[in-house]
Amino acid sequence: MTLLLTITITTLLLMILAIIFFPSIKIKSFKISSYWLIALMGALLIISFNLITLSDVSQGFFFEESINPIKILTLFLSFTVFSIFLDEIGFFAYIASKVAASAHHSQKTLFTSLYMLTSVLTVFTANDIVILTLTPFIIYFAKNAKINPLPYLLAEFVGANTWSMLLIIGNPTNIYLATSFNIDFFSYLLIMALPTLSAGVSSYLIMRLLFKKHLETPIENSVSMAEPSRPLMVMGLIHLGFATFLIAISGYLKIQMWLVPLIGALSLFAVTTIYLLFNKKSWRILFKVLKRVPYGIVPFMLSMTVIVIALDKYEIPLFMAQKLIGISPLFSYGFSSFIFSNIINNIPMSILFTEVLESSATLSLPAVYATIIGSNLGAILSPIGALAGIMWMTILKKEGIPYGYGSFLRYGLVISIPLLVVSLLGLGLLF
């Protein structure tokens, strides 16, 4: 067990250092994210030292349940295709420019409008994609309008990681935890509506207070974006809406959830191909969509799953579950998942805490939902909390926005802790 803990702790520490100091490695013309390479090396070391067998790994990846790591990855990557497609045709930027234009030179109105837009888009797409899509637009708009981009960047990031709690499809951690404990779409929504609404309203008020002085300056210029292709926009929105609807009722139709977005993504590509072929247009958009799919999450999640499988074999989750016994499950799991998200990232935290929850003497639904809350809001505390934070920081650095690890943590502490408390109190009213 000592060797396993040494490899695990070393891997986690190196991942944290990589995220802070060298988030990517450039080899000639290729740029590779360092976080998943380190996780992969840790997993390979665990296997090479025979701490677990290949049979253990195979069983952990492909176990016969409604959901497993492979199905989760298929679901998440397929669903991101819809959002990336809509972004590539210019839908998100066009909507954002219309919202910005409606502010009429008022930063307060603009702040409220962009926060609401981020929230709505996050609910119906995915938080990671919304963050990666709107961040460049916000920076471009702020530079053109000669205003400070920070209030809007934080509103976008915090809003996306708050409203991602509302639906089961809003975050891969929601999907993993909820489906692991057979929580269906509507049961999830009924419970998470109040905590999400509480956190959403609170986050808006906190940030309005934080940036009160910044938002007093009027906006000088505005930005307009070209309207996206209507046929492609309609095809993308129909596929996204239909996939969301089918996921919502998949439990009643006895359809495995992960199949819905996979079939939808394949259908979207097929329909788009036919449209482009008949209209003699370039297929470049499809290649750009495929290029932007976040493939790095695959080796990262599978590598972290290997580490969790090994920890489970040596009963580390059972030890953690025993330590949490006797403490209010709602707050103990809520705060511990929040903290662990910022130690090992929220996706591996969700994998680990699934084992912890299953090792508990009695399964507590409040504990499951509290863990989901911690996995989402943990992303706001530090860039380690979620992959979106790592990618967001990379964009800011590339665009010359002075927002380092210290700034992230400073704002994260002020915003995330109150949101966590408010969300857990809202959850507590339902149990």
Image: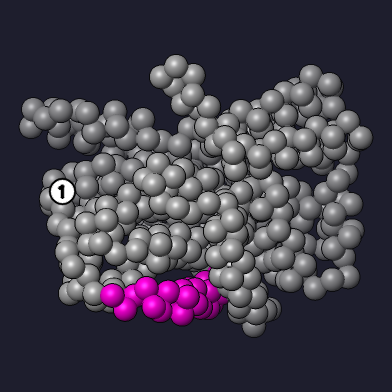
Q: How many marks?
A: 1
Question: From the viewer's perspective, is 218 left or right of 259?
Answer: left
Whole-percent x and y of residue 205? 46, 80
Instruction: Give the residues in magenta.
Output: 192-217
Is-magenta flag for residue 197?
yes
Residue farthest toward the right in the current orientation of the protein:
2
Main secondary structure of the magenta stretch: helix
Residue shown at the point (77%, 24%) measured from the top left: 45
Neighbours of disc 1 within 10 Å: few (<14), some (14-19), many (20+) = some
Residue shown at the point (32%, 35%) measured from the top left: 289
Residue 161 visible in image: yes
Whole-percent x and y of residue 92? 27, 53
Pick whichever, 245 or 53, lies toward us.
53
Residue shown at the point (66%, 32%) measured from the top left: 39
SS category of the residue bearing label 1: loop
Question: From the viewer's perspective, is 139 left or right of 52?
Answer: left
- Quarter-of-image position of residue 35: top right
Which residue has dot 1 on it? 228
Render colour scheme: one colour
Is-magenta flag for residue 227?
no
- Quarter-of-image position of residue 268: top left
Q: Is residue 44 above or below residue 269?
A: above
Residue shown at the point (48%, 32%) measured from the top left: 295
Residue 243 visible in image: no
Pick whichever, 56 or 150, lies toward us.
150
Quadrant for the N terminus, please: top right
Residue farthest toward the bottom in the current orientation of the protein:
429
Q: Is residue 206 above or below residue 57?
A: below
Whole-percent x and y of residue 393? 48, 48
Q: Amino acid at mark 1?
A: Pro
Whole-percent x and y of residue 150? 40, 62
